[in-house]
Image: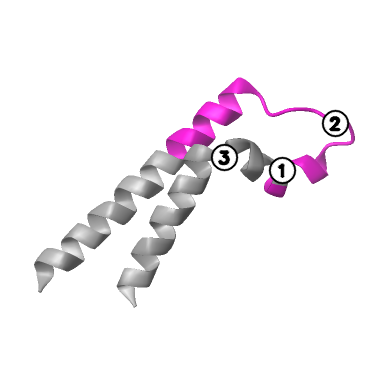
Amino acid sequence: MYVILCIFLIAFGLFLFLNPEGFYDLTERWKSSTDSEPSDFYLKDTRFGGIVFLVFGVACLVYLFFQH
């Protein structure tokens, strides 16, 4: 069960890190009446969040691996 959660965290972190524009399209674009692009800060912040999810997911897997 926890392994699936760790894999989900890693996959979500990779998505945020590699494709912040896609995350913007899914979560923020519909709120704007103009066809605007995400700011540089939004892209950097989303990538940072992706790194956090990725590191937490990998740490979770390592913990589960060494627990047994």
* Residue 41 drawn at (x, y percent): 57, 23
* Residue 65 drawn at (x, y percent): 16, 66
Question: In this rendering, is residue 12 above or below 8?
Answer: above
Residue 1 as seen in the image, left or right of residue 31: left
Seen as rendered, the residue at the extreme top is 40
Instruction: Name the amino acid, label 2.
Output: Asp
Residue visible at 17% across and 61% down in the picture? 63
| CB contact under 8 Å: marks 1 and 3 | no
Mark sitting on residue 19: 3
Task: Tell us which disc is closer to us: 2 or 3.
Answer: 3
* Residue 58 drawn at (x, y percent): 28, 53
Give the residue at mark 2. Answer: 35
Q: CA distance from mark 2 to mark 3?
A: 18 Å
Question: In this rendering, is residue 57 above or below 25?
Answer: below
Seen as rendered, the residue at the extreme front is 18
Residue visible at 64% across and 36% down in the picture? 21
Instruction: Name the amino acid, label 3.
Output: Asn
Sequence-first tag of 2 and 3: 3
Q: What range is drawn magenta here?
A: 26-49
Secondary element at tag 3 = loop
